[in-house]
Amino acid sequence: MAVAPQIANDFVFPSFSLLGKSAFVTGGSRGIGRACALTLAAAGADVAVGSSPSGVDAAEAVCQEIRDMGRRSQAYAFDVATRGDVETMCGRVNSEFDTVDILINNAGVNLRGPAELLPESDWDQVIDVNLKAPFLVARRLGPAMCAHRWGRVINMGSILSVIGIPHRAPYAAAKAGLLNLTRVLALEWAPHGVTVNALCPGPFATDMNKPLLDDPEKYSAFVAKIPLGRWGELHEIAGPALFLASDASSFVTGSALFVDGGWTAQ
């Protein structure tokens, strides 16, 4: 019976430390991305915060919060779905942070509407940001992780990676594709000590979900599908994100961790 505390002291708690690690969080200026960036910094990581050009001021504010913790941080504004921007910015991040150890592909957009009325441009934008961009960023940063034989890639999936909701055709398609991209990269990079997993939130109170939060009928309909009976709070994504980013998840790859109040268990 005395073994458990020894295991906890010698392995469990130290395994969550990110001291000496560098992380890059795309879409890190607000919402879940901001929560992840602050969590990694609190665990000891230096954190690069990526954002769209319009979000650079918010990203810089997050960086200042991280610096106040005593960690290094820098904001990077770029178009995450444009290969040239990704190549340039990831090159800078790798150089200025001495190689990224942890990547959280969090940048996302959701444009809603009936499939038959949805503009093709909306489809393209959602697929580009939610599926193409994680591919571009991961393949740019993954090889250096493989060369160092340690890395964590976390792709921000969704409950829509495995279920469908009306009026979400491009988002659901992108998040389902992202889950299988996660599995493929996990298989390719496992021999090099790099794990790749998906973190799949349910409804959280973020700017992306503002149209639902502001509509009492839609809000109630969503809550009715959540066994825990409420939306998620941003602090509740911190533990799962840290787990997948740290040595605590060293034998976990190609998996999806659902943080959804039980929605997908039904």
Image (cartoon, grey):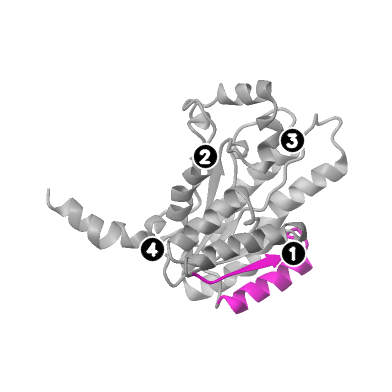
Kind of residue at badge 1: Phe
Marks 2/3: CA–CA distance: 26 Å
The picture places residue 141, in percent across and down from the top left corner, at 61, 68
Marks 3/1: CA–CA distance: 26 Å
Is 83 one of the magenta-colored residues?
yes
Say whether residue 116 is visible.
Answer: yes
User: Is tag 2's residue or tag 3's residue first in the polypeptide sequence?
Assistant: 3
Q: Is residue 221 above or below residue 244?
A: above
Closer to the observer: label 3 or label 4? Answer: 4
Tell me, yes or no, whether the two marked residues, 2 and 3, touch with CB atoms within 8 Å: no
Residue for badge 3: 169
Marks 4/1: CA–CA distance: 29 Å
Marks 3/4: CA–CA distance: 39 Å
Residue for badge 1: 78
User: Is tag 4's residue or tag 1's residue first in the polypeptide sequence?
Assistant: 4
Kind of residue at badge 4: Ser
Crowding at label 2, few (<14), some or many (≥20) Cα neighbours within 10 Å?
A: few
- Is 205 in front, or is 104? 205
Residue for badge 4: 17
Kind of residue at badge 2: Glu
User: Is tag 3's residue or tag 1's residue first in the polypeptide sequence?
Assistant: 1
Closer to the observer: label 2 or label 3? Answer: 2
Label total for image: 4
Q: What secondary structure is found at the residue carrying circle 1?
A: loop
Closer to the observer: label 2 or label 4? Answer: 2
